[in-house]
Image (tube, rainbow, N blue to C red):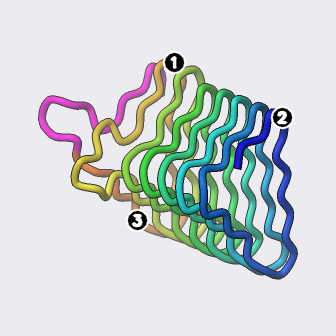
Amino acid sequence: FIAGKDIDLTMTNGDLHVSDLLHSGQDIKAVVKQQGNMYFDTDVVANRDIDLTVDKGILNVGRNLTSGNDINMSVQEGTLSVGAVVAANKQAKLQVEDGVIDIGEAVRSTDGDIWLTTTTGDIRVGSHADAKENLKTDTGSIYVHAGSGNIDIGNSGPKVATISSAKD
């Protein structure tokens, strides 16, 4: 699905499933209210912002999530997962209140901060064997916080930084 401007998807008490590429010339906003899951089988791309929110359920992007500006992903209770890379030109903010953040390869920001936070639950980044530079921002800071849970960030190998930040 390709749109020249914004894409706005809202579901209440049900699943939202997009099986093909989702590409917006501007912003993408998708919300699953109350209970339900959000699935994107392949890449999600926006020239500006991406905002994805699930109240209670699973938020899953099968491959890459790419934004020309900010990426905000939020799950109140459940799992937030991306199969490959989260790439934001500006800020990348992924948060789960009660559940798990699982990123297959990496989270990257060209000109902003990276935030990965859970209140209760684990954070995993770089579980794929070929994942490199698991957390990288060229000009910003990286914040990773699991209130009560584990943090597991992959190993990029001896010659590539697993975590790379211009600031904190």
- Frontmost of labels 1 and 3 is 1
Q: Over which residues does the magenta segment extend?
A: 156-168
Residue at x 61% of width, y 63% of height: 19
Q: Toward which corner of the image does residue 124 lie, by quadrant?
A: bottom left
Residue 130 in the image, given as x and y percentages of width and height: 23, 48
Secondary element at image label 1: loop
Of 120 and 34, which appears nearest the observer? Answer: 34
Secondary element at image label 2: loop
Q: Toward which corner of the image does residue 46 lie, by quadrant?
A: top right
Q: Toward which corner of the image does residue 47 lie, by quadrant?
A: top right
The residue labelled by disc 2 is 5
Mark 3: few, some, or many residues within 10 Å (few <14, many ≥20)?
Answer: some
Does label 1 or label 3 sit earlier along the sequence?
A: 1
Residue at x 83% of width, y 81% of height: 13
Residue 146 horizontal side relative to residue 6, left or right: left
User: What residue type is disc 1 on?
Assistant: Thr
User: What residue type is disc 3 on?
Assistant: Asn
The CA distance from mark 3 to mark 2 is 39 Å
The CA distance from mark 1 to mark 2 is 28 Å
Mark 2: few, some, or many residues within 10 Å (few <14, many ≥20)?
Answer: some
Judged by its main secondary structure, the magenta piece is: loop
- Residue 139, disc: 1
Q: Is residue 159 magenta?
A: yes
Does label 3 or label 2 sit earlier along the sequence?
A: 2
Of 148 and 16, which appears nearest the observer? Answer: 16
User: What residue type is disc 2 on?
Assistant: Lys
28 w.r.t. 35: above or below: above
Does label 1 or label 2 sit earlier along the sequence?
A: 2
Residue 89 in the image, given as x and y percentages of width and height: 59, 26
